[in-house]
Amino acid sequence: MLTMLGYLERRTTAIFAFLILLLLTAGIYWQGLDSPFIFDDVPNLSPMGKYQYLGFWHDVGLFLLQGDSGPTGRPISLASFYLNANAWESASAFNFKLTNAAIHLINGILIFWLSLRLTRLIILPDTFRVWCSLATTAIWLLHPIQINTVLFVIQRMTELSTLFTLIGLHSYLYARQPIADSKYSGALWLILGMGGSLLLALLSKENGILLVVYVLVIEYFLLRPFHGSVSPRMTRSLWLMAWLPFFLLLAYLLMTGWQHSASTARAFSVMERLLSESRVLWSYLGQIFLPSLQGTSLFHDDFQISRGLFAPVTTFLAVLGIFMLLGVMVFMRRSQPVLAFAIAWFLGGHLLESTTILLELYFEHRNYLPLYGIAFAIVYYVAISLQRFNKLRGILLASLSLYTVLLAGITLHSAQQWADPLNMVIGWLEQHPRSQRTLETLDVLIGEHINPNTRQQLLKELEQAGQQQNTSSYLKLKPLLQACQAGTLTPAQLNQTLVALPNSGFVASAPKVYADLVDQWLTNQCGHVEATDMLNFSKALLAIPDLQQGDMPYLLHYWQAQIQVKQGNLDATIQHLETAYAMKPDIDNLLLQASYLSSAGLYQAARDKIETAPSTLCTTWRQCWIVALRQQDLDNMTSVLAKQLQK
């Protein structure tokens, strides 16, 4: 009876402590919720509400179908943003970030539950099991490396993918024993629970496929070393539900590496990316174990690319270190299974985003779930040391507590910085003075509202960063936009920019600056620049090979069409729109062509354009659905043209 009462008392205390942890996490992140949208937030969210005139469900459907963040379109994540649709209309990020924080807390609950189950399976005493799970969850919830995932609105995709991955892991753990006992419930847990979670995780973000990697890591690096072999039924089930998808993933990564081996879409090759990522992974580990007191930074575009095994020389050391980790993981799997598990979990968690796919090199949100294995191992080895070295009990507990408090303090500081975007970006700039994205963000935030000398220094630093990374096209184009806004733009400035651009390199922000420039010119004329000057400038940009990346070719033709409209040149307008349509087929372009043809009295030609929509647009199932949802727009235009033809 006393034993039972003691157990209940410990359990009640643990539950209370866990609730306090959740409240502490919520309180810390609350400090940063009143912060702005940033970086990819607006481009990804801006289509939301665009088609409300067609009806709510049509608007939702089109928003989901037009998602282009990844191969799957990430419809689950995009749908979740409609929970905060009213906040988007008021341009407030608070509710979006509040939802992100809530998902983070739910993931924390699932992490705590997973830790309880794993610590039971590796046979930790009950007195340690609950508190180890609590400490692991505290590190995971409070670590400052998580803050960019929670407060960067669009990274809800990472959070939701993690949510379904964790549900899938729980389903797999539930399935193990029933499958061994030949019960149908085991198959249901594995197929519906784990399989359904895998699908939902993938539709939230592509790294949901890593669920199968995490399953294999738990099975072969944690459970089997502690429990030995399992039933043949479980082995066969794992081959179907985990090994087969894992090998397909490896084949995809190898195929992607081969296809992109000669790609120039990034400033690095596939091999250079692999070499660089070896250093990035060690940087992540450094941040996990010893986070900076300054907090984290969203942008790391100044990270030095590894051009060879010894360029820089730290690349060789990093690659050697990765192979050493792999050796420890394999050869110490039975003697030190938790250490092997932590390494396998961390490296496996980076298998998709840190290998052959030509993504950007460095983002801290990629550690959102990979952090868990490290946190689990830290707490486990502290618990084992407490059992073996009783005299060091106070020091060990104090060290773990101090480490957790330090994490919470840094995260609190970072959250408060998010609520003060100017100081936040200045803090990022102090950490990464050659980060072009940070400099661009600071330029956008403060713009003309600072001392001219300070602004000139900022632009100088931005130019140095752009030259260093061969991505200064943004800087070359931005003064043209500023001159246009001030009404002082001249043809000479356009020509001077054309001289400088061929050696400036491409940067993703350059196309938008060009589009804003032409849009501003169409609205206000902005100085002494005539239509022929702007057309010649745009044509010259098309002739610069390094700039023909991303949306730049499409935007060059689209905006030339708008300039030709202003000139009354219908043939040239349609020609540019058709070229843009060939690059990126969309209904709005087709409707625009029909509208221009109709305004010139060419009603049959306009009708012919509309009638091409099904054949030219319906090339994939997704495009066919878009056509179906936009059919009302096509019918309306067809009806107007039919009336004109009947006159």
Image (cartoon, grey):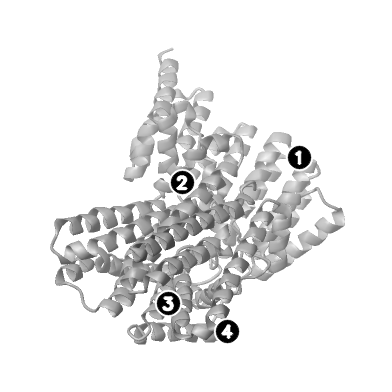
Distance from Cα at disc 4 to Cα at disc 2: 42 Å
Direction top: furthest residue: 647
Observer able to see residue 415: yes
Residue 343: name its quadrant.
Answer: bottom left
Which one is in front, 279 or 256? 279
Report the residue marked by disc 3.
343
Q: Which is in the foreground here, disc 3 or disc 4?
A: 3
Report the residue marked by disc 4.
314
The reply, left or right, for residue 24 in relation to residue 493 is: left
Q: Secondary structure at mark 3?
A: helix
The reply, left or right, for residue 574 in relation to residue 201 is: right
Q: Is 26 above or below relative to 594?
A: below
Report the residue marked by disc 1.
526
Distance from Cα at disc 3 to Cα at disc 4: 21 Å
Mark 2 Cα within 10 Å, few/some/many (few <14, many 20+)? few
Which of the marked residues, 3 or 1, is nearer the chain's N terminus?
3
Which of the marked residues, 1 or 4, is nearer the chain's N terminus?
4
Which of the marked residues, 3 or 2, is nearer the chain's N terminus?
3
Q: Which is in the foreground here, disc 4 or disc 2?
A: 4
The reply, left or right, for residue 526 in relation to residue 591 is: right
Q: Amino acid at mark 1?
A: Cys
- Do tag 3 and tag 1 residues touch (Cβ < 8 Å)? no
Q: Amino acid at mark 2?
A: Lys
Distance from Cα at disc 2 to Cα at disc 1: 30 Å
Whole-percent x, y for residue 342 in the image: 42, 75
Which one is in front, 365 or 523? 365
Whole-percent x, y for residue 23 in the image: 55, 52
Which mark identifies residue 584? 2
Which one is in front, 73 or 563? 73
